[in-house]
Image (cartoon, grey):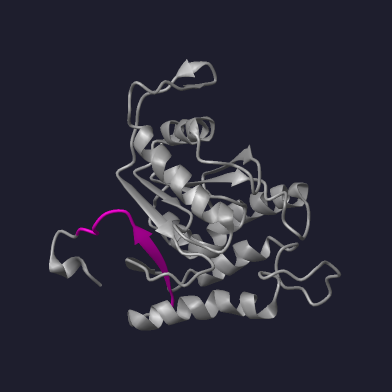
Amino acid sequence: MKLDILVFGAHPDDVELSCGATIAKEISLGKTVGIVDLTRGELGTRGTAEIRDEEAAEAAKILGVSVRENLRFRDGFFVNDEKHQLEVIKMIRKYQPEIVICNAIDDRHIDHGKGSKLVSDACFLSGLRKIETQLNGEPQQAYRPKLVYHYIQWKNLTPDFVVDVTGFMDTKVASLMAYKSQFYDPNSSEPVTPIATKNFKESILYRAQDLGRLINSEYAEGFTVERYVAVNSLSDLV
């Protein structure tokens, strides 16, 4: 299956938190989108890996993505080495996306920066035909995505571009609320974490509102890039 966009997250919920509305918008425009989680989030303070599996599957249904896979790397301990790169390359060659979106280049959680660099490096290496991979016993062809973007997570990094996601925040929030074990619940007896506070839950909307304000829209999500953003003409800018 060839996808238009393949989105990677170090943990289940990374993608929904950071670019869920963008995904929903792209799907509404007829794009095919898939998600690959690097880990099951098994070190998360709240819930379990099994619960995360169920929550991720439900969130994928809400967003309407075509496929969701999990590479089952070790949460907190995966590294950017040949072994892990080859597993990511297999996913890139399997789905041959035009665009890859991955974790923030710098963030509070160490897995986010690691995951960002790992996927970015794999996108380049995937285009080298002398790197041989197989999937289900069949050799894969070399393939390199045209574009690699990074979403923004905990830290308020300055975006290189923003996407107007007005009209798609309800879908994003619904996909996030599928992760019932992770976010704010005043009746929960689980330990409080940075993302399980009322302030963080509210920040999902007000961060998107603030970026939207800066581009004269209601909501927006921001991204950073590895090379200059190019447009065909000045009128392409919203």
Question: Residue 133: x and y, percent?
Answer: 46, 22
Where on the picture, by quarter, is residue 120? Answer: top left
Quarter the N terminus occupies? top left
Examine the structure image and report whether residue 56 is included in the region drawn in magenta.
no
Rendered residue at 66%/42% (across/down): 74
Rendered residue at 44%/76% (across/down): 219
Rendered residue at 76%/47% (across/down): 50
Q: Nearer the viewer, residue 144 or 175?
A: 144
Is residue 161 positioned above or below 28 on the image? below
Where on the picture, by quarter, is residue 178? Answer: bottom right
- With 101 as the anchor, is 181 left or right in this view? right
Is residue 18 positioned above or below 83 on the image? below
Q: Which residues are magenta?
A: 218-230
- With 38 as the anchor, is 105 left or right in this view? left
- With 142 as the anchor, is 102 left or right in this view? right
Quarter the C terminus occupies? bottom left
Question: Residue 31: x and y, percent?
Answer: 39, 50
Is residue 96 positioned above or below 235 on the image? above
